[in-house]
Image (cartoon, rainbow, N blue to C red):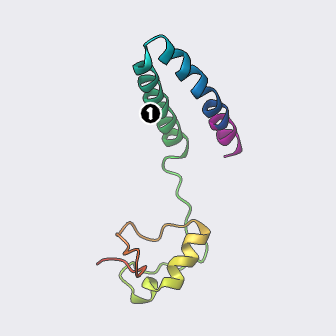
Amino acid sequence: MGVVNILKTLAQSSGPSVTGILAGRNHFWVAFVVAGSLKAAYDLMLLAFFGGRVRPREDGSGEDSNDAASDSASDIAEDTEQGVIVSSEPVDSSTGRRHH
């Protein structure tokens, strides 16, 4: 993701200058149209590149998402550190437990 971050930084640094020029010529709305279009194109390119690439869990356990042991806060914290999504079920942010 290093290349993506470099390109984002370059694009963000040139934005205020372009917006200032457009605002000075009474075309401030163009900045919003261009920004929205670039954001949509960026999101679609990320989807095309990374879409469908899901890594299996490294621990190899095929645990069921309804298993009470998988709901513990320590399991959720460990999975968050590893960047693994265990379930798409909503999680209560105050308790760290999934809603069933």
Q: Quadrant of residue 29?
A: top left
Instruction: Kindly give the residue lying farthest to the bottom in the view shown.
Output: 69
Which residue is most to the top? 25
Left or right, 40 with respect to 59, comes to: left
Nearer to the camera, 49 or 91: 91
In this rendering, is residue 23 above or below 64? above
Question: Can residue 60 be seen at all in this image of the molecule?
Answer: no
Residue at screen point 55% across, 16% down: 21
Residue 84 at x, y percent in the picture: 54, 67
Given the current orientation, which residue lies at the most extreme front position?
24
What type is the residue that disc 1 sits on?
Ala
Residue 9 falls inside the magenta stretch? no
Instruction: Give coordinates of residue 96: x percent, y percent.
Output: 43, 79
The local secondary structure at tag 1 comes to helix
**Vertical relation: 63 (above or below) 47:** below
Quadrant for residue 7, please give it.
Answer: top right
Q: How many marks?
A: 1
Q: In the rendered structure, which segment of residues is drawn in magenta?
A: 1-8
Give the residue at x 47% y 36%.
Answer: 44
Q: Nearer the viewer, residue 49 or 2?
A: 2
Q: Return the residue at label 1.
A: 40
Q: Does the image show residue 8?
A: yes
- Reply above or below: 31 against 49: above
Q: Residue at x 31, y 77 (%)?
A: 99
Identify the residue shown where x is 39% and y is 88%: 68
